[in-house]
Image: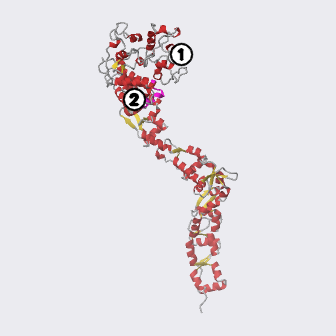
Amino acid sequence: MLLNHPPPYPNEAWSSWLWRLAQRNYVASPHELLPSTLSQTKVPYEPVVFRTLAELTNTSVETLHAHTPHRFSRLLHPPETSAAVLALPTQQPLTLAPLHPNRDFFTSRFGWCPVCLREVRYVRLHWHVPLVVGCVLHACWLLEACPVCTAPIREEEVLRGRCSRCGLALEQAHSVPIPPDDVLLTLQREILEWLYHPEQSQLGLSHVPVGVLLRVLYGLRFAVQRAGDDWAFHHVPFGIPVPQRDILKQRSLTVFERGCLYATAYRGLLEYPHGFYRFLDAYRTRPAPREKTGLRSEFGTLYISWFQRFWKHPAFDFIQQAFNDYLLEHLPVYQIVNTTRVRDYPELLNRVRYLDLAQTAQYLEISVKSVYRLVEETHLTAHRFPEDPLGVWFARDELEGCKQRWNQHVPFLAVVQQLGLSKRLTLELLHAQLLRRVPAQVGLKQRGVFVERDSLQTLLNRLKTVTTIRPMPEPGIPLRLVCIRNGSVKMDLTHVLTRVLDGKLLAYHPNASLLPLTALWFVPQTVQDLAHNVKVESDWVTKSDVRAYLSVHWRVIPVLLAKGLLHPVMSLGQKQFFSRQELHSLHETYILSGEIRRTLGIPAVFIHYLVEQGIWSVKTEHRPGEPYIFERLQFQHWQQTYIMLPELKQLAPDSAWRTERLRQVGIFPIAHAPLVYSRKEVMAALQPNEP
């Protein structure tokens, strides 16, 4: 049991408190004060150590934690690792610092402020942080050794107030002031906020953990250290000897060297991201030796070690994004697209203004040969830059335009698969203009058949408005069967869909998407007379109708087709359909030998004789076995001019009187085989005599 239990001073270091505890209990050192099992312990880690020390010092575990490096555990742990939690029942979880913290973040050595020691003699906890190089209360640099004998100062010497080697009173030591408006003093205030009040950071990056900011600051400091001693961006506070700032070999830095390096690095975080951009602008002009090519040449170790290695954790995305923004704004595109950074951050490729030939082929998902084809067809424009004479570049805006157009082009096989149709039926939809084919001159990514996406969607949307969604019942007839049953009128897929779209045929489908299209079905009553309705609506007639209307033999119809007097409007194998209007026009324009024979009441051979004698002239070339074809108007005129024996027999049944009468008036036949007379003369001779 200890007789005296002095409480720790505000922000007092753990080691300083142990030395004061030993002095107040008249013990030479803390090693004699602590139990033998804890005599070598510098910083407690195990729960049993915390409990034992809390009992020994007559204080709480929370108080012990607040005066050890564990208080800064959130800064000392890298973001990719999680801090261990002290396994003791406390009001708030107490995290533990790494067992061996980075010496750039925390060390057993410490600096000290003489003015602070005049007020109270003890070691402040933040004096162990190498980033703390000055005292913000008294605006002066910390001292790291005795200014007379240069011996390092330990905790017991701070408590006694004198250097054990030369006896100098530490409170009387002279300190170097820091100008009140210097950026170094601003940095020191910010560091103290990170250490004790991390939620009160003044950098405007409240969303970034202070441990991440600390590592960014450390990386910038390391880059500053490798930038060269004559770098114009270096910050050196007034009133100090100019320190060495180009430090390539690993060694302990003096307080002035650390202060200048960290103050310069801190300028890259002020007014973020503009301060960071100014830092990068200046860093590209550094005098230090450079790498030969690429981003390594521009940004050296800052890029190689930090952006590409130590800042890869997602917690550093804010600085990585700012760096990407800077690259896109300040570097030519040929220095960006072929770097490993594009591989790590593919979104960079989506933001650059130009892509080279290989990236263009990859971006458009085509071959290099296809890229050249698009250039030859003037769908793409190749660009070249003076700094990269061998490179071929393409504007992203133009490539995005190609992609947007191509997104509206659906490959033919994809349409076939989506609609569930065969290739032949899908081609029929294209020929019928129910789907629109993409013209070849619009710059397709590859040769082939493409369908406009809008036309595909339009077809489906139009069908949805006239189609009822309902599962197919047992008596339902599917689309395929409807087409087969009505093949006599060539009612194929396009005609059926056209009737559905026109509201002439009620269709059903089990799926609201109408896919596949072959699942369309119909009620039997609506399709049983479909073929007849199609013929009536189209005003079509069959060969049988033509034969009956013209009163001709079957063999006459091929003759009319061959002579071009009759044209089928639709053919399906041997089955043909004709326009009723064309049939009427044929009948009104021409007359066939069969109708003449029936009209005149003469044998067919008489017609042949009349033609041979030149009395009748045929309209078309006549071949043996074919019927004669005459112009109807010409025949009617001939019939009004001439009269033949059958009609004479009707006018004068008495053949002896008729013959004698014609002989008396001197009327003789114009032709004898058959007999043909002048109608006017005959009619005048056969009229009865008036009284």
Residue 38: percent from left, percent from top: 51, 11
Residue 2: percent from left, percent from top: 49, 10
Q: Is residue 322 magenta?
A: yes
Instruction: Return the residue at label 1.
Output: 51
Q: Nearer the viewer, residue 534 or 207?
A: 207
Q: For the residue carrying disc 2, how many other residues have a C-alpha within 10 Å: few (<14), some (14-19), or many (20+)? A: few
- The magenta span reads 310-323
Where disc 2 sits, the SS reads loop
Residue 251: percent from left, percent from top: 39, 14
Determine if residue 290 is in view. Answer: no
Extreme-bottom residue of the structure: 691
Three-letter residue code for mark 1: Arg
Please tell me in which quadrant of the rendered image residue 380 appears: top left
Where disc 1 sits, the SS reads helix
Count all numbered tags in the image, as a single digit.
Answer: 2
Instruction: Return the residue at label 2.
Output: 203
